[in-house]
Image: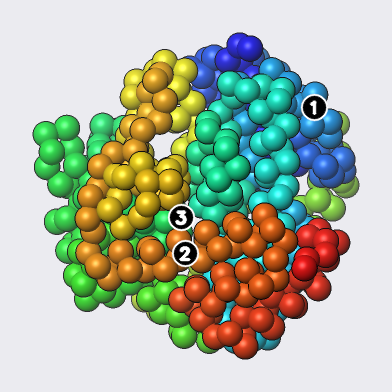
Amino acid sequence: MGNDKLVLVGGGGVRGPLFVESAARRAGELGLAEIVLLDIDPEKLHLLGAVSAHLAREHSPVRVVATTDAHRALADAAYVVTTIRVGGDRGRVVDERVAMRHGVLGQETTGAGGFAMALRSVPAVLGYADLLRRLSPDAWLFNFTNPAGLVTQALVDAGHERVVGICDSANLAQHAVAAHHGVDPNGLRPEVYGLNHLSWARAVRDADGRDLMGPLLRDPAFRDATLQRFFPPELTELTGTWINEYLYYYYFAEQAVAQLGTETRTRGEEVGERNAALLAELAAIDPERHPGRAVEAYRAYEAGRRSTYMKYAEPSSAQGDRTLGEGTEGYAAVALDLIAALAGGPARHTAVNIPNAGCLGALEPSDVAEISVVADAEGIRPLPIGEVPEPQAGLIRQVKTFERLTVQAIRDRSRTQAVRALMAHPLVLSYSRSAALVDDYLAGHRDHVGEWR
């Protein structure tokens, strides 16, 4: 197997064109000759695949292939990125509405909503990973399918070794500090610990070991220009860290549920309407005949979607989109940076989700953590973090217990274990609520999860 084939599983998704554009722009650096878009929805694959192919042609001669044949896509692959949404936008809406009915958070990666998405995501991603292991055993798999950390834990528990969970949120501190100082983020060393969407950055150091982030966290202008504006300065002082924006759902749990409950549409309903409108517009344009117009429509869609990201967490004084260091490549940048390092380029320091191998004292060595790593031609290795403050450590352990129990419940198709899992989650806890949530989710997603015992 060569190292010239990159596969995007879920390539007919709305983020596919952004990923392909980034990969095509860096195709020479990465040694890519072919990008394969794999999806089970032929209509979306046709429309968004055409947009992707046009964007790629603007940057390099890399070949873009669209297919619904998983065997064809994964054979002889060097790198695979999984970004799928089992059940589509409707599944997300069910997750949100069921959670709201029971008075808990329905966000797609956190709490009850994340649990429901895992019920559908884990078996599907495991299926692709098993097929990849048979067809291309030396390939690297980068999982972006949510809940990314939990799905990666399931992959590791199933014996898959070359798997990495990726998330752009884990690296925002590094990129914000780099943007502020006008330096290359790859020259900085982040110290990140926790779980996916439950992590903290305690430092971002330069080559001489100096922490460049600490002073900036006390700078109102810096905080206001980053997602740290979601959190009051007192909370930053209490943790002494950059706080992952998804911790808003924990540190402001009752406020988040109340705010989401006042929305006339859930986030899933809003995104679903945007997605449907985009697909209808692309179908009317015909991207193969009018690629320029199709790209314009796609750019407008993407800008509109980004503008509403976590809008309920914005302080009332916030003005517009001012997120320092947050580029448009998102998760693509994380995956492509890792591929560049694995392909023999310069070593990269970043944060990803892999077994922490004893580097994080709050967890067992086999527990997948969102943690600082170094990637190079030899592989991807976690860096020592050691002990962390007990308030963070306690929350990490509790949510990891939920993740472990959820993986077991899915593996055994056990309703009892699923109830135990939600009872362990700090945003659910109640037995009566957990049991009702499990029953409603198993019923609402029966077409995708089947019958459980």
Local SS, label 2: helix
Which mark is nearer the camera, 3 or 2? 2
Of the numbered discs 2 and 1, the one sitting upstream in the chain is: 1
Label 3 with label 2: CB-CB less than 8 Å:
no
Type of the residue with mark 1: His
Rate crowding at label 2 as few (under 14), some (14 to 19) or many (20 or more) other CA atoms within 10 Å.
some
Type of the residue with mark 2: Thr
Residue 197 vs 64, above or below: the answer is below
Q: Residue at x 71, y 50 (%)?
A: 123
Q: Which residue is mark 3?
A: 196
Rate crowding at label 3 as few (under 14), some (14 to 19) or many (20 or more) other CA atoms within 10 Å.
many
Local SS, label 1: helix
Q: Which residue is mark 2?
A: 401
Residue 8 vs 418, above or below: the answer is above
Q: Residue at x 78, y 66 (%)?
A: 452
Label 2 with label 1: CB-CB less than 8 Å:
no
Asked which colour scheme the image uses, the reply is: rainbow
Q: CA distance from mark 3 to mark 1?
A: 30 Å
Q: CA distance from mark 3 to mark 2?
A: 14 Å
Q: Position of residue 236 (x, y in %)?
A: 24, 68
Q: Quadrant of the N terminus?
A: top right
Q: Residue at x 46, y 84 (%)?
A: 255
Q: Which residue is mark 1?
A: 71
